[in-house]
Amino acid sequence: MRIELQKRARVSTLFSVLSPLLALALTLVFGAIMFWLLGKNPVSALYSFFVEPLLEVWSLHELAIKAAPLILIAVGLSVCYRSNNWNIGAEGQFTIGAITGSILPVMYPTWHSPLILPLMLILGMVGGALYAGIPALLKTRFNTNEILTSLMLVYIAQLYLDWLVRGPWRDPQGNNFPITKTFQIEAVVPEILSSSGRAHWAFIFAIVAAVALWFMMRFMLKGFEVSVLGQSERAGRFAGFSARRMVWFSMLLSGALAGLAGISEVSGSIGHVQPVISPGYGFTAIIVAFLGRLNPLGIIASGLVLALTYLGGEAAQLSIGISDKVSRVFQGLLLFFVLSCDTLIHYRIRLIFAGTKTAEVRG
Amino acid sequence: MFEAILLTVITASTPLVVAALGELVTERSGVLNLGVEGMMIMGAACAFVAAQLTGSPYIGILAGILGGGVFSLLFGFLTLTLVANQVATGLALTILGLGLSGQIGEAFVGQPGIKLQPIVFPFLSDIPFFGRVLFRQDLIFYVSIALVVGISWFLFRSRTGLKLRAIGDSHASAHALGINVIRTRYLAVMFGGACAGLAGAQLSLVYTPQWVENMSAGRGWIALALVVFASWRPWRVLAGGYLFGAVGIGQLHAQIVAQNLGIVIPSQFLSALPYAATIVVLIIISHNRRTTLINTPAALGKPFVPDR
Amino acid sequence: MKKLIIALAASAALMGGFSTGAEAQEKKKVCFIYVGSKTDGGWTQAHDLGRQQLDKALGAKVETPFLENVPEGPDAERAIERMARSGCSLVFTTSFGFMDATVKVAAKFPDVKFEHATGFKAGPNLATYNSRFYEGRYIQGQIAAKMSKKGVAGYIASFPIPEVVMGINAFELGAKSINPNFKLKVVWANTWFDPGKEADAAKALIDQGVDILTQHTDTTAPMQVAAERGILAFGQASDMIAAGPKTQLTAIVDTWGAYYIKRAKALLDGTWKSEQIWDGLKDGILTMAPYTNMPDDVKAMAEETEAKIKSGELHPFTGPINKQDGTAWLAAGEKAQDGVLLGMNFYIEGVDDKLPK
């Protein structure tokens, strides 16, 4: 038996909707088998993965907190990837954004002005953008590959943060532990609905950024420019677009959004700066971007789904003792099914058996 | 002391070089597999477990190669047969690999491993300095050097290598010439997986003969960066890998020397040196736009579906 | 397919009903939050062994659920809150980085008791606990000074936090009590957990001329390197004798179980109260692995020091002690205060490393 693909004349709208559902069904079936093989009750395992985190209000808030940085970073990256700029260093831009954004509350802890928070957010975006500007500069000026430079800058950013909070930024009252002072209340991103949980405005920023970029990609000339240059630099040149400027545009944009995610996370979710501020959001966001098919609205959905699997993995650990490792395997499984089912949107799949019989998935 | 430091550098650099060489072949065929870290850690787990169960590190090496190779098939099936997105699939492979390897090795945490012993070349190993450094090493080191030579020859001197590069530059033209794009790419992906697995085996059998979760600690990512650094040329992978390893070991010695001299340098800055050095050297060598373009596989990361 | 989904949904709903209602049992939940994997072979594994001991000792009365691989930051806050909401009576958060998250959740759930390891912020329902690792390091220093031929030891350090600085100082103090000229070389690996880097650091120290190694990182890699190079070494967090049967002199073994059992009992008795607890060798929160690979007189000396520390006769940080730059810190007979030790950010005389300001 072999599998053959046939390109569809047009993108299948039916399968655009159906493929995630099919992927979910496959994940449920294979996940159930996996949990059953491990001697766990498959129904309760799947229940705690996909349902339990959605049942309580506080947990929905947590979902928003977890999804916000993923979505913010991923929508920025989608513009990069659509225009063929391979920024994989969002984790570093996130870190630097968190640092530059935190300059005000760390250096001026007694400044109680409503101006401080907007300034912090702007500084965070500027920091993230400038840091992403390094690979952009190196690419346009010295033609170095941005995959390498952006990745290496991640490690440098993390070590820089480590040095800062263990050295100059250390809280003098903090027993010499590597944390800064807790931010003054004016410097904290406010909660959306503080009566029911701690989700804060970063989630709103994420949604706004996603919708704005969706609008840009869909209705504005800039969006067209991104797509054309991404498809073919030559074609873009004929249309009068500059690939060099696009490097700058996409890198600075994604850097600014990653920086915004960084400062929102530090200010809204953590409340001070510490050596570890991200469990790898910048890398996970790359998956989120592609899972959302590089479409900003799709990214909102994929960001929420991925966040759900983290929360679900935790719930499953607690309620039925599934180890964190198994959660990661299950997460990988889900990603594989989603990615492979997306094939159906662009292609027909034929299963060709040894004889002449063919089975076809039509749609 | 120089000899001892060099030996440390060799041990630290070999896994980077081996994994990067595998990825280089994969990428030369036009496939970008970002799952090196996942395949590497799978190789480390499989190698360690097999060596513990059989008592033979050589069976461990085989298991590592097999573990990485088979694991990469998953990536191959998704990206080549089902044309799923390569970047996302590679990252998902890393997540899966970290989880799965932890599961495989769980019962073996804390067990002292079996170290792969060096193969000593008689007479040659007695040469001062060079003998110790070049002729009294473990099998994986020799393989890493052989891979550099072999892959250079294969890519630039053999017919099959030419075909592989043709596919990486334009799968459509290669297909039109009657080359089986998908099959070649499957083989290239598996070769990359096998090399990553071998690099993993080096970690759990030579570098630090033990198993702990996550023991690759980001080395797969460095290997990926090395391929770009080397602009897809095997000898440069070797040079880049050793540069990275040498700066990493050098900064540890620099810490001690600085202490002896009473100089204060934050260790974080020294730790950042290998990454900064890689960027700087890349800037210097990629100045010439034309040579960079010639070596970059033009079809890298682009999906291919044969039309009938 | 449809039928299957309906069946799944129905049984899922059933499960949900059961898990919220029917679990009103008498067992108390004592819960744990881990920063690493419970089989990491280091810090987290030591805590998990403690949890298992607790389970064994009081299994009839307590349940011990745990969450592993919880990243420090907002994830920690969520994980701790999940524990509090799931009916835990006592929650142990076992990493320094969980401090502020624990403080926040503790304020939200006044009826749940929390204990945070190695931190300094306490509250009415939030205790802190720590282990006097430095007592073990002092003994190690004494052994090192006796066993080293060159009079130089190497210290593989993780990050410059008070805990590690205190460990370095205690080691040097112990060594200087035997050999006043003993030197200590420090290499910062900038990681708690990377066997490769730890091995590299060990090799660098050996190549720079130390003949005894001690580590403040989590894996057995440095012990393996020491064994291979034929020098002596000390283990960390767990007994690493398997990695160096002819190498390990002793190890500081984290035995949190003793502490966890003590506190769970207090919870059951109703005598639990918020305290800032810093237990040592005498309480069993840390133990020394058997003294091996040393002559009998050295072993006798180590055992004697251990006994003196346990009885309170000897406090490692007793003056006269000078700071690194030669200025006086403690006068003769003066003992360091716990608060100073817990926030330690300076070296004593004899350490070669310089702390960045």
Image (cartoon, coloured by chain):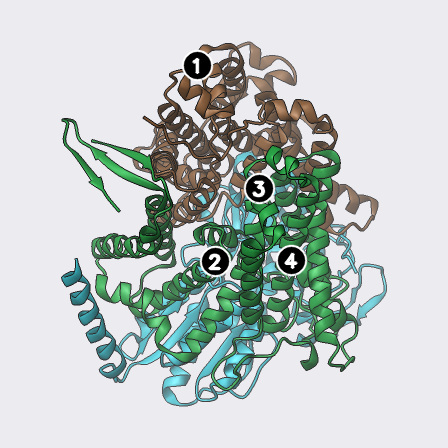
Chain colours: A green, B brown, C cyan
The residue that appears at 54% across and 74% down in the rendered structure is C101
Secondary-structure class at tag 3: helix
- C-alpha span from label 2 to label 4: 22 Å
Mark whose residue sits in front, 2 or 4: 2
Mark 1–mark 2 contact, CB under 8 Å?
A: no
Residue C296 is left or right of residue A47, and the answer is: right
Mark 3, mark 1: which one is toward the viewer?
3
Q: On the image, which quarter does residue C81 sit in?
A: bottom left
**C-beta proximity under 8 Å, tags 3 and 1:** no
Contact between marks 3 and 2 (CB within 8 A): the answer is: no
Earlier in the chain: of badge 3 and badge 4, it is 4
Mark 3 = which residue?
A228
Q: Amino acid at mark 2?
A: Ile
**Which residue in the structure is indicated by mark 4?**
A95
The chain under label 3 reads: A
Determine the chain carrying the residue at label 4. A
Mark 2: give few (<14), some (14-19) or many (20+) Cα within 10 Å. Answer: many
- The residues tagged by marks 3 and 1 sit, at their Cα atoms, a distance apart of 35 Å
Tag 3: amino acid: Val
Mark 3 or 4: in front is 3
Q: Decide: is A193 above or below C144.
A: below
Q: Which of A26/C161 is in front?
A: A26
Looking at the rendered structure, the number of numbered marks drawn on it comes to 4
Tell me, yes or no, whether dots 1 and 2 are on the same chain.
no
**What residue does disc 1 label?**
B160
